[in-house]
Image (cartoon, rainbow, N blue to C red):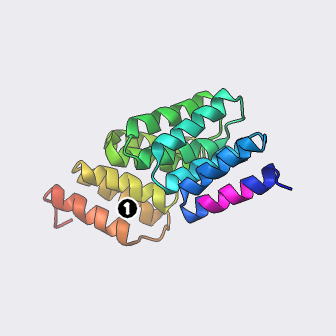
Amino acid sequence: ELDSITFNAAIGACAKGGVWGEAWQLLSLMAQCKLRMDAITCCAAISACEAGEQWEKALQLYKVTTQSKLESNMITFSAAVSAVSKGGKWEKALHLFQVMAQSKVERDTISFNAAINACERGGGWERALTLFGVMAHEKVEMDIITFNATISACEKDGEWQNALQLFNLMAQALLELDTITFNAAISACEKGRKWEK
């Protein structure tokens, strides 16, 4: 017998496999079976849309979550922010991140990283640095993704001093520097014509 748990597991598998169309079909089938979506269903479906680069569908599901009075949790918001950001809609992504704070939903490393990635894609280095500072102030753990996205945001706008400062902070935090880190820092220096740094 099909139940919500079965559908949630199947939609979650679709998310991991990056097959948003199948996840969408499962949502339709779930409705036909007169089963209600819960926060887990919506989150898994939003993640599937994110993996399939279907930001409009992800945003539509997020709106269903809020309109249905389903509890929007950290995971739901983070998935929606990330999906919208990957779709190039950084303003919408940052708006969702603000709504998350206004809704008193705890923001974690993943949600901050999604918002910083949105800044990297178009929101500007100042916003990325502001979010980086908020993370430090709120004592949210920063990881390699946090640093790389913030460094990349600075790099894209030629802010080599900030990129190098973050690079040094990353080394001091004993985080393992990777190819993305080095490439972003080198590119920032190149754009700032500071190749000797």
Residue depicted at 82% across the width and 54% down the height = 2
Chief secondary structure of the magenta portion = helix
Q: Which residue is mark 1?
A: 168
Say whether residue 36 is left or right of residue 142: right
Say whether residue 18 is left or right of residue 171: right
Query: Looking at the image, can residue 141 be seen?
Result: no
Does 133 lie within the magenta span?
A: no
Vertically, is 61 above or below 164? above
Where does the magenta region start and end? 8-14
Query: Looking at the image, can residue 156 be seen?
Result: yes
In this view, the residue in front, 148 or 56, is: 56
Amino acid found under the numbered disc labelled 1: Asn
- Picture quadrant of residue 100: top right
Residue depicted at 35% across the width and 55% down the height = 151
Does 13 lie within the magenta span?
A: yes
In this view, the residue in front, 109 or 38, is: 38
Q: Position of residue 141 (x, y in %)?
A: 58, 53
Q: Position of residue 28 (x, y in %)?
A: 66, 45
Vertically, is 153 above or below 174? above
In this view, the residue in front, 175 or 17, is: 17
| Quadrant in which the N terminus appears | bottom right
Residue depicted at 47% across the width and 48% down the height = 54
